[in-house]
Image: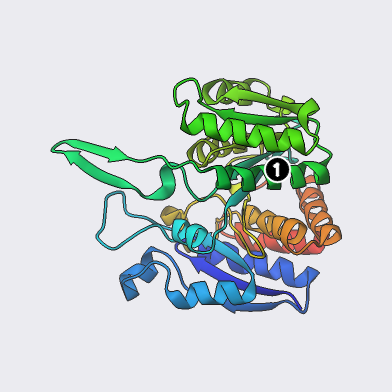
Amino acid sequence: MHRLCAIPGDGIGREVVPAALDVLKKLLPNVKVEEAEAGWECFERHGEAVPESTLARMRDCGAGLFGAVSSPSGKVPGYRSAILTLRQALDLHVSLRPVRSWPVTSPKAGIDLMILRENSEGLYSGREHWEAEGVAVAERVISKAACQRLAQRTAEVAKARQARRITLVHKANILPLTCGLFRDTCRDLLMGEGWGDVLDERLVDVAALQLVERPEAFDLIVTTNLFGDILSDLACHWSGGLGMAPSLNWGDGIALAEPVHGSAPDIVGSGRANPLAAILSVALLLRYHWREETLATRLEAAVQRYLETTGHLDFGVDTTRTITQGVIDAL
């Protein structure tokens, strides 16, 4: 039996997670769903953004769906982002973020790429300190072990996708130690796995330009934590924006699906939240963690049929309900 820890989080997370669960239950009627808390509002209630009980439930279930998190714009004593805490505490060391053309929402056809982002370290390691008055320092952590794990997962995804191109994205000309270690470690492992013929590399600024100019030229993009965060948000424009941007935080024997969008406090309770990013995140969980390739393909095909049939998305008061039911009907 499949077990899933549902963590709605903040804002519209409490709207899109139930929608995605309704779709999942159509595909897997016997899935056992257990709910847990995390997020800014959880911190306000309990003094911690991710209670130990949530981490324990995630480990016990082995799979989860996270909604969205609200975070303060400034430092709050004792608070650290819930999703960063989940990624690091559960060792969800790789993030998969696909970008593809969809009917209605995409401004360009023919795009089907995936960004594989190192998910555990880099500038998101949380190492910040004051060096002197008026001088703050953040430490960027890049380890050979984390790069090897990312490259190994890249080889696995490349085999499943029959990848035509793998692009390492870095800034080794300016950061020769950290980005150099990332590039060389990933390149050596991928070449050793037989992917040398389709392997290339780009500086991150050039990659950003080319993602705007010719996104269809990319297949797999492999990069560090911060670069992956920025490039995936840029690239999701071609899917139709953050409302169409799914992701999977992927560890060893554990995974957490997560729509890329935020908590959208301005539309909470209005019924206007687009659940497709959460629904498509479930498809990633099905394919890569639960190894339910047939069900994942069915779900993505249902989203495709729904968008083709409806011909438009009207973000009115019944958006969440209407889209969810439309996908269920298309299954």
When asked about the image quadrant of residue 217, the answer is top right
Towards the viewer: 200 or 114: 200
Q: Is residue 236 visible?
A: yes
Tell me the quadrant of the picture where the N terminus can be found: bottom right
Question: Residue at the spot x=51%, y=31% of the render?
Answer: 179
When asked about the image quadrant of residue 294, the answer is bottom right
Q: Give residue 118's position: percent from left, percent from top.
A: 56, 45
Question: Residue at the spot x=65%, y=61% of the render?
Answer: 252
Please state if 179 lies on the left or on the right of 18 as rendered.
Answer: left
Q: Give residue 330's position: percent from left, percent from top.
A: 82, 59
What amino acid type should be assigned to the residue bearing mark 1?
A: Thr
**Secondary-structure class at tag 1:** helix
Question: Residue at the spot x=60%, y=31% of the render?
Answer: 184
Q: Is residue 171 above or below residue 64?
A: above
Q: Give residue 221's position: percent from left, percent from top.
A: 66, 34
Where is mark 1, residue-wise?
154
